[in-house]
Image: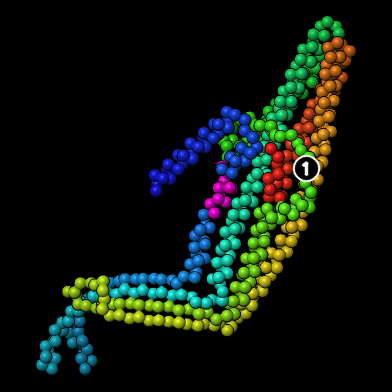
Amino acid sequence: MSLKIFILCVFSATSFFLTTTDAASQPIGLDRCIEFGNTNNPVIKTSQLDQILNKPAKLAAIGQFLPRVSASYGINQSSSRISTFVAEDGRVVELPALVYGEMIPVENRKNRNSRYSINVSETVFNGGRNYYNFKNAGLQEKIREYNYSGETFLLRSAITTAYCSALAATERLSLAEELLTQRRRQHNLARVRFETGSVTRRDVMQAEVDLGRAENDSLSAVMSNRQTLENLNFLIGFPIDSSYTLSNLPDLFNPDWDSEKLAAEALTHRSDYVISDLSIKMNRNNHTVSKGRYLPQVAASLSHSRSEQSGANVDFTLDPRNRSTAYNLSLSWELFDGFTRELNLEQSRIQHRKSIINRQDLERQIFKQVSEILYQLRSFYQQSLVADQNVGLANETLRFEEERYKLGSATTIELGVAQVSYIQARNDLINIETNFYIALGELENATGMVLRRQ
């Protein structure tokens, strides 16, 4: 067993090393990160371990209908020595002694005993408790499965957020490096033009200030990129300092789902809603069990034993000759228990009603969540169309101002304004695209369905 565990650990470690090495050598996408998370995340592993209880729990529920069987076998040996006895006149007489002309010796006794027994007992009727416990065991198995499904969607949403944030940070870093390159080129050009007398010292100083800001922005973007990637590594189970390239997400699409229909579908897919429905059934079963406590209980049992006593010189035996068999059928009815049954019955009824109210409230929350997130998605999509146009216009303006600056007809400030406008337009588009896919991940979690288009 220890060898199997060792081999399994080595195999898992090797697979993880090869997986992370492969991920570092080529770009990975969001779906791949989700697969890594489902494999490595400890919350998912814990939920998977809960699935192991399904089979033994079902067997235990079935076992309630089967008789209880026990068997025992025992041997014992005893020895005793009688050295005195009490005479009629109350004296303690020590043996051996002559009593009424008869010599009574010291008596040594040794006995051996062999015994075995088999007991079988069965609860014939206990108010339906075993039957409803069996039904609840099946419901509990489904709850474990839906708990696992719910954890995977929660993790999916968290990884989507972390992935989009890391991808956005990477794009912002690229944008910051692009701006830094422009600022350096602008600074060099300003110095050359200053030496030729085309611009004043003020233009050179402004170019130096802009370059310093671009350098700080680049350093900040590097730190943000590192932090967001570490957060993603933590969720998918990679070493925190792992570095790799992220694949770009598909283009944004128009989320043309119908809010009411999507929310209605969510009621059949979302794990916590299905679990709430299963909880109602379990509480209803528990309420029925509480009613069954007012009914009598019927039990039956069979006991068979064999034993044999012998002297010290006789061996123990596996086949004792003395036999005893007993059959028992009993009916018990608790007529009064100090109102405990009434309390349990009312508690189970209240718990059943609470579970119905909780499901109704959860249904309203699902419709509200789906409607709100879907509205956000549509807004982000419309904003992305405008932002994309703004990027195009800002890029044209920047190119125009760069040409003017080279020709000496534009100032450093005018060029800087065009650069800032372009960077802001690009940042706006990155933020909108990031928010769109983060909201889409939240909508997937709210509906319990995969909605992202490839």
Q: Position of residue 332 (x, y in %)?
A: 51, 82
Q: Position of residue 361 (x, y in %)?
A: 75, 60
Residue drawn at 67 percent across, 68 percent down: 352
Q: Quadrant of the C terminus?
A: top right
Residue drawn at 11 percent across, 91 percent down: 102
In the rendered image of this protein, does residue 129 appear above or below residue 392? below
Residue drawn at 62 percent across, 65 percent down: 282
The one nearer the camera, 233 or 443, is 443
Left or right position of 152 against 5: right
Tell me, yes or no, if residue 385 can be seen here: yes
Residue 295 position by quadrant: bottom right
**The stretch drawn in magenta includes residue 174:** no
Mark 1 residue crowding within 10 angstroms, few (<14) / some (14–19) / many (20+): some
Q: Position of residue 55 (x, y in %)?
A: 51, 58
Residue 10 position by quadrant: top left
Extreme residue toward the top, this view: 196
Q: Which residues are magenta?
A: 40-51
The one nearer the camera, 294 or 194, is 294
Task: Give the main secondary structure of the magenta stretch.
Answer: helix
The one nearer the camera, 177 or 72, is 72
Residue drawn at 57 percent across, 46 percent down: 42
- Judged from the image, the secondary structure of the residue bearing numbered disc 1 is loop
Left or right position of 384 against 454: right
Tell me, yes or no, if residue 78 can be seen here: no
Left or right position of 401 against 298: right
The one nearer the camera, 24 or 386, is 386
Left or right position of 393 against 275: right
Tell me the kind of residue under disc 1. Answer: Pro
**The stretch drawn in magenta includes residue 49:** yes
Residue 106 position by quadrant: bottom left
- Residue holding disc 1: 255
Count all numbered tags in the image, as a single digit: 1
